[in-house]
Amino acid sequence: MSTLNLSVENRIAVLTIDQSGSSTNRISMAMMAEFKAFLDEAEQNEALQAVILYSTKENSFIAGADIRLFLDFEEPDDALAFSREGNRLLSRLSALPVPVIAAIHGAAHGGGLEVALACHYRIATDHPSTRFSMPEVTLGLCPAAGGSQRLPAVIGIPKALPLLLSGRAVTAREARSIGLVDDLVPADGLLQAARVMAGNLAGRTSTRERLRDIAAKAPLPDLSGLPGIPGLPDLTGVAKAPFSLLGRAARTIRGNVAAMQPAFMQAERELKIQTRGLQPAPEAIVACVKYGIKNGLEAGLEFESLMFAELIGSPENRELLHAFMARRFARRNPSRKKPRQIDRIGVFGTGLMGSAIASLSLRMGFGVTVRDRDYTSAARANQTAWQDLQKHVERNAMLPFERDRILSEMRLTDNYADFAGLPLVIEAVVEDVSVKHAVLQEAEAVLAQDAIFATNTSAIPISEIAKPARHPERIIGMHYFSPAQKMPLVEIIRGEKTSEEVVATACDVAIRQGKHVIVVADSPGFYVTRIVVPMINEAMLLIAEGADIRIIDAAAQNFGFPVGPVTLADEVGIDVMSHVFEEMNPVFKKRGGRFSQSLHRLYENGYAGRKNRRGFYDYDSQRNRKRTNEEVYDFFGGKKRRDVPVDEITERLTLAVVNEALLCLQEGIISQPRTGDIGAMLGMGFPAFRGGPFRWVDAAGPKKVWDRLQYRQNLNGVRFKPAGILGDQATSNKPFYSK
């Protein structure tokens, strides 16, 4: 069945994109073949005066390439041929001697945005579903169809590099403000507006000649002074060609010549800090942009294809592709039970976490009622929501009236009675079971019998919190991670008596909040906290052995963690971690392990981390560099430090996390390795390019990991005793994943 359908009316062609059997349009080999046939016809049709690309999907222009394409490439040459063909097709589209207009509603990601960039004009709807991104870097790849060349040409290098290197999606309004799209229109007027634009352009005389003339008069500037890129192929013999986007691209680049070098230097500095040379894709993207500027569009496209083929199938790409599939899995409700429809939720507590939960819920379309002990305290949630929404206004992603309309859906109260009609409430008070019991009992006195009470806790067992409940089947854990507005995971904890309908509804709410979900069994620390705590504990023991705080954090980052365990303790809060250690102690004591007591002593002496500017690091605002707070060494044996090999630190921290994840699978806290990998990657920052704890074990080899754990057990103690499930894998030489 055809994906592309061509209709011509008044010499204006509309190429309709509608992939059958799918809610989204995704680039496939079949779609590319149909697109080639369209170009063959359009190039020969002298009567055409304009072309419009338009999707009939509800919320999708083109959502990128079908990820299975990348998984199916057997050889780098397959990837090279794919990229070259994509570049050929889009270059032909861009070279059509009539105006080509992309009419965009819904997602335009990756290859979809590359198609739009090859058009001469882009008109988009101002609908929330219309978003643009170049997410290839998150898959360990560079763009494959001109994204690294045309995006900088259209919006300028300083704006393009952050989007290429982060994969961040921008809204339609933000895209308009940075010049990515030319006009915004209401969703129901998109095709009509595109036809009007096409008609206006088609009505001008000598359109074909005008396009050729503008392109010819706007060549790329001479940037021969830019430094070369060592170790990459010389493509200087490839013919240079100007961008034929009505001349705008060339003018954009020329206007940014002076800004180019600082933009590249800034990007390269940040890459060194963020990736530590562990991920090749970001550096390849910068190289592609540089090469295209220096050598022209055609050479840049060929260079991009070569880089794409080199990256595809690399260990990092392979794991990131699997991580992508896992994230997509975690955006689906794992429960087969039908969830209840929830439109308004309640939030108890307006501290850092409660305010954040209220804010993200509001922004994602829920009405929110917030309670604290008085209106002044409750108003903190309103302030947080305003600040979060204002950030969208400031980057032109939202209009002020939209901010105010959304804020109007927040109600503040100091009275439990105002929650009487709400179907779901989220408790986010302090991590103290007696306080949580008090809130639960007050709430149940006014809530309907079928209302769901979700508790946000990082370690306290749900069944413990549910002890005084009248309806324990309605109690569930919803563990958000700080900062809740940004962290992508919600850990759903099923209590001993929690009903399946409650699980389904909690998952549905979290997914509608824009989160990924995993469902785990009830136990102190659940899954994510349980695998984080051994890592932080190992860091505390290393400090006590004389290791330098900064080197411990650097060792973790050298493995790929976004922050080290000592910094994490400061960010979460030494007070919180001290409490979590106490909650988790029974689990580790049962196995003969030991917890460092130094965190407790720090807490007792007034150290809380970043929140009170007293932690492992010095948070003096007058200093630009983060420095160790030397005072804390007094709680770890004194200020004298010794050299501990970085490799030893990295191994101890990593194995502490991985072994605990294995134990969680063994004990049924998680039901499958994929759940454990999703939770580790999205909840604690286990490097996605390593695939998560279980895929990392598969890559390293179960027998090798078993041997290293035994070595560490003999050297460092029983806390490194390998999980029995790993022994089974090592003996049978069987991986956790079949592929």
Image: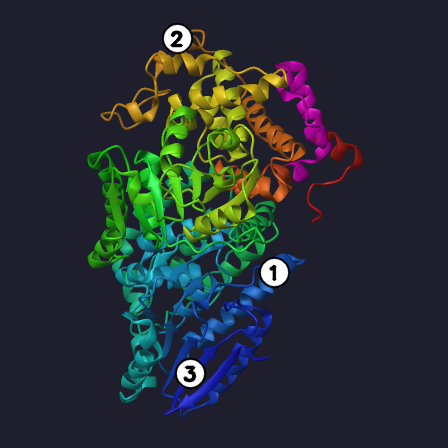
Q: Is residue 26 left or right of residue 392?
A: right
Mark number displayed over residue 87: none
- Of 2 and 85, the residue lying toward us: 2
| Residue 414: percent from left, percent from top | 25, 37
Q: What residue type is labelled 2?
A: Asp
Query: CB atoms at circles 1 and 2 under 8 Å apart?
Result: no
Q: What element carries label 3?
A: strand
Residue 320 in sight: yes
Kindly indicate the quadrant of the structure image that contains residue 385: top left
Mark number displayed over residue 68: 1
- Cα separation, mark 1 vs mark 3, equals 29 Å
Q: Mark 3 points at which residue?
A: 14
Q: Which colour scheme is used?
A: rainbow
- Cα separation, mark 3 vs mark 2, equals 73 Å
| Residue 72: percent from left, percent from top | 65, 60
Q: Which of marks 1 and 3 is nearer the N terminus?
A: 3
Residue at 35% x, 14% y is 630
Q: Compared with residue 632, is residue 136 higher up or lower down, i.e. above or below? A: below
| Residue 535: percent from left, percent from top | 52, 25
- Of 262 and 52, the residue lying toward us: 52
Per the image, is 716 magenta? Answer: yes
| Residue 66: percent from left, percent from top | 56, 63
The boundaries of the magenta stretch are 697-725
